[in-house]
């Protein structure tokens, strides 16, 4: 039986995780948040005092990181485990997000995680989100979506998310970080953020959550019949 793969790419703060998770639930597919996997590596490096810009040092600790994905039936969410510890909440800290952007540009890290991601797609119908899913990780995915929104809209959503989690946040700082991460992700030499030629563009700048979800479901239901 051939499994269906849905690749959702896009810049930071576009709502990929929320929308991909809900789309996967609607379709009965497995949701894979690849950003959370990179954040887990970033957390592992941070805990060892390894700078995310020191590629050689980061690559040297990869074999010591036992990274696992688990799905909690109570909340239906993908939980990340690092060396046996559930770090799902910790990896969402703003500091970890910034580290993850640098970590994900390291070739050795990408190679280390690539097979893990592809193996999930070989064995399940998946909705997988990230920044190079349709171009590098799953180039043969039956459905490819490039999800985006203006930097201002993405910063506002991220700002509200941080506030809801009880984290201190400043809108201007969040916006600056969004713009910086866009630049880093788009210009990195390894697997830069870009829209696959056959990806459906979904711009959610002026869409609410439900409208964005319906746009994604329409793309999936059309693509998985081709």
Image (cartoon, rainbow, N blue to C red):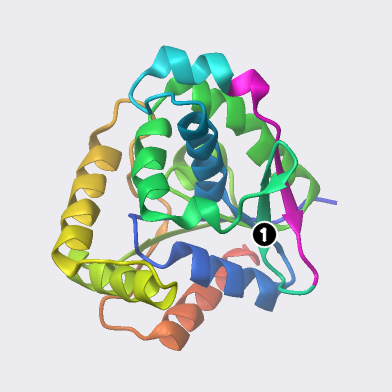
Q: Is residue 189 above or below residue 133?
A: above
Would you identify the image quadrant in which residue 154 lies?
bottom left
Q: In the image, is residue 72 part of the stretch drawn in magenta?
A: yes
* Residue range corresponding to the magenta coloring: 62-73
Residue 139 visible in image: no
> What residue is shown with label 1?
78
Neighbours of disc 1 within 10 Å: few (<14), some (14-19), many (20+) = some
Q: Is residue 99 visible?
A: yes
The answer to whether residue 199 is magenta is: no
Image quarter where the C terminus lies is bottom right
Q: Position of residue 138 (x, y in %)?
A: 57, 42
Q: Residue at x 70, y 45 (%)?
A: 85
Query: In this view of the protein, which residue sits in the foreground, 123 or 105?
Result: 105
Q: Nearer the viewer, residue 68 or 96?
A: 96
Across and down, in percent, residue 66 comes to 70, 32
* Quadrant of res 74: bottom right
Q: Position of residue 198 (x, y in %)?
A: 42, 52
Instruction: Specify whether 93 is left or right of 34.
Output: left
Q: Identify the residue at horizontal 65%, vertical 28% (top origin).
A: 65
Could you tell me residue 223's position as x and y percent? 57, 65
Classify 13 as above or below 28: above
Q: How many marks?
A: 1
Residue 138 vs residue 81: left or right?
left
Q: Residue furthest right?
A: 1
Q: Along the horizontal axis of the image, is 140 left or right of 168?
A: right
- Per the image, label 1 sits on a secondary structure element best described as strand
Q: Residue at x 55, y 42 (%)?
A: 40
């Amino acid at each position: 039986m051939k499994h269906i793969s849905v690749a959702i790419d896009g810049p930071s703060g576009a709502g990929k995780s929320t929308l991909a998770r809900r789309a996967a639930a609607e379709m009965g597919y497995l949701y894979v948040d690849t950003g959370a996997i990179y954040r887990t590596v970033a957390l592992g490096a941070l805990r060892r005092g390894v700078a995310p810009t020191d590629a050689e040092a980061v690559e040297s600790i990869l074999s010591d990181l036992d990274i696992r994905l688990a799905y909690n039936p109570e909340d239906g969410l993908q939980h990340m485990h690092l060396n046996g510890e559930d770090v799902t909440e910790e990896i969402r800290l703003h500091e970890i997000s910034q580290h993850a952007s640098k970590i994900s540009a390291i070739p050795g890290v990408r190679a280390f995680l690539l097979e893990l991601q592809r193996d999930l797609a070989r064995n399940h119908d998946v909705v997988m989100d990230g920044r190079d899913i349709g171009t590098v990780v799953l180039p043969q995915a039956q459905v490819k979506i490039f999800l985006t929104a203006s930097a201002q809209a993405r910063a506002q959503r991220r700002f509200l998310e941080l506030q809801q989690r009880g984290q201190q946040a400043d809108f201007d700082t969040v916006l600056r970080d969004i713009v910086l991460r866009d630049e880093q992700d788009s210009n990195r030499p390894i697997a830069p953020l870009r829209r696959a030629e056959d990806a459906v563009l979904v711009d959610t700048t002026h869409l609410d959550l439900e409208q964005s979800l319906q746009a994604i479901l329409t793309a999936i239901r059309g693509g998985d019949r081709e």
